[in-house]
Image (cartoon, grey):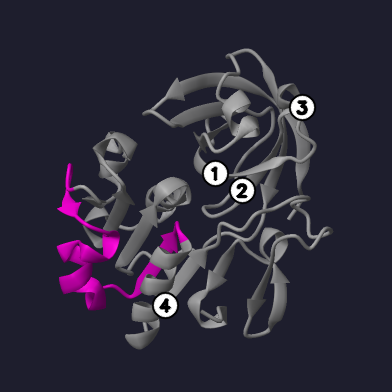
Amino acid sequence: MKKYNEKLLLLENKQLNHDNYRLVLQAERDLSEIFPGQFVHIKIEKAGVLLRRPFSVFDVNKEKRTISLLIKIFGKGSKVLTTCKPGEKIDVIYPLGKGFTMPDKKDKILLVGGGVGVAPLFFMAKMSGIYSKNVSVIIGAKNQGEHISVEDYKLFGNFYFATEDGSVGTKGFVTDVPEYIDHLSEYNKIYTCGPSPMMKAIVKEALKRDIFCEASLESKMACGIGICLCCVEKTTTGNRCVCTEGPVFNAKELTW
């Protein structure tokens, strides 16, 4: 798949909660080649950092030629990015990585995410093409303040929430949500992205039930194009670069 290095126009920078922002970037070209699970690599010139930063694609509007990104403040680079103003140009390499395997319209799918791992799952729910009653999304966070609004996405699936403090949804982790505990075997495809302990638990259950499952890994990256070998993951077929051969891997490939 062809990759582009362009300066995209920042249309919107909206704060969603304490640490999360949504950036909307506009391209001049068609964006139909971007799929859920892929990411972009951004050069944050104002931050004075050497390496680009990877961000999963949160949404794509093909008619308006816009890419939406969910930015969580982790360090200097991401913090500076959240201060950019509409009208500025952002240096972006896109689309990168291997995305999720798109389901068939007859499938019943479960998407499970936590933290910034929710980003590719919202795009997946929208792009799946599956009748909304057969799409379920379980999202976990520490508290209500860390959840982002999903009102626009409720057209594409059923949403369930978990918070560690019980401030919204089920108290506990995503694996404590009744929809997960009681109905997991009803799904024939599971997609997950988020903290490693969460994904490992989900992959384990999927393999035990012989359910197709893919996980999007959140490995640290440097070059983003498979040269530096910073993001190598051990798999059943050998060491593989998350940035080019992932970030999405089939559960059966992982050595967890």
Say what amino acid the circle numbered 1 marks.
Val
Q: Is residue 117 above or below residue 43?
A: below
Q: Left or right of 43: which side holds 141?
A: left
Which residue corresponds to mark 2? Answer: 39
* C-alpha gap between disc 3 and disc 2: 22 Å
The question of residue 141 being in magenta is answered with: no
Q: Residues within 10 Å of mark 4 (few under 14, many from 20)?
A: some
Q: Earlier in the sequence, mark 3 or mark 2?
A: 2
Q: In whole angstroms, how far apart are the C-alphas of marks 4 and 2? A: 22 Å
Rendered location of residue 220, percent (x, y):
65, 54
**Residue 103, how many percent across, how many down?**
43, 66
Quarter of the rendering containing residue 51: top right
In the image: residue 56, left or right of residue 95: left
The numbered mark, 3 or 4, whose residue comes first in the sequence reads: 3
Residue under label 3: 48
- How far apart in space, not on screen, are marks 1 and 4 (Cα)? 23 Å
